[in-house]
Image: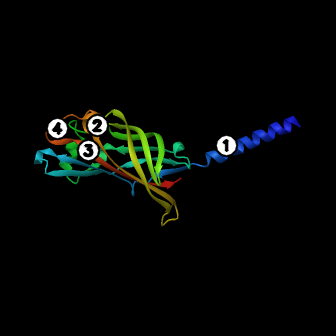
Amino acid sequence: MLRVRSVWSTFVGVMLLAALASAADTYEVDPVHSFVIFRCRNLGQAGAVFIYGRFNDVKGTIVVDKDPAKSSVNITINANSIDTGVPDRDNHLKSPDFLNTKQFPTITFKSRKIQAIGKDRYRVTGDLTLHGVTRTITVTVEKVGEGKNFKGMQVIGFQTTFTIRRSDFGMKGLMNVAADEVTLTVAIMGIKK
């Protein structure tokens, strides 16, 4: 009888763990509907204009759990995919004066902690690696929506806007041409695996 109970307890324990593991959903970043957009003041034009651009190659995964503390975000951006609409400017931004994409081809963000701070709003803390330097940042993220897309696939979307200083990531060149502060908007849509 004791052995039967032991086997039964083990079976129930395994089933409970399996149920808990399946509580989280994993989403793959959809590069077609995900955007990383930036703006930086152009000081070379008397600060009268912002330069806008985007990164065209964004990948990663989002794990969504009913308990936000068990959720996670892992994003990788191809730094060479920078696009301001002006090829000469893009090449300069890829150079050692700025991103130095030959030496640092990727920009990554990996979450450490996620907590709910309101309806569909979260505080996300994680490691941003840019230009070979890793800094821990905290951003406020909004869940934009979720449901089935036109193909019947389960999707979810999140968005955040935050500002970093490029000097914090070792990009200290040409401060008289481009401002230190860069504002980023990250809008990510994930497709459930």
Q: Position of residue 183 (x, y in %)?
A: 28, 47
Q: Nearer the viewer, mark 1 or mark 2?
A: 1
Amino acid type of disc 1? Answer: Leu
Query: Please, what is the three-letter code of the amino acid marked with disc 3?
Result: Val
- Single out the residue that lies furthest toward the front: 118
Residue at 46% x, 44% y: name it: 73
Horizontal side, residue 97 vs residue 154: left or right: left
**In 3D space, how far apart are the residues under numbered discs 3 and 2 (Cα atoms)?**
21 Å
Q: Position of residue 95 (x, y in %)?
A: 22, 39
Nearest to N terminus: mark 3 or mark 4: 4
Q: CA distance from mark 1 to mark 2?
A: 45 Å
Cα separation between marks 3 and 1: 44 Å
Q: Position of residue 54 (x, y in %)?
A: 29, 51
Q: Secondary structure at mark 1?
A: helix
Q: Amino acid at mark 4?
A: Met
Q: Which mark is residue 175?
A: 4
Numbered circle sitting on residue 102: 2
Residue 151, given in percent of the width and then of the height, sits at: 50, 65
Residue position marked by numbered label 1 in the rendering: 17
Q: Earlier in the sequence, mark 3 or mark 2?
A: 2
Q: Which mark is residue 182?
A: 3
Amino acid under disc 2: Lys
Numbered label tally: 4
In the structure shown, which secondary structural element does the residue marked by tag 3 occupy? strand
Q: Which mark lies nearer to you, 3 or 2?
A: 3
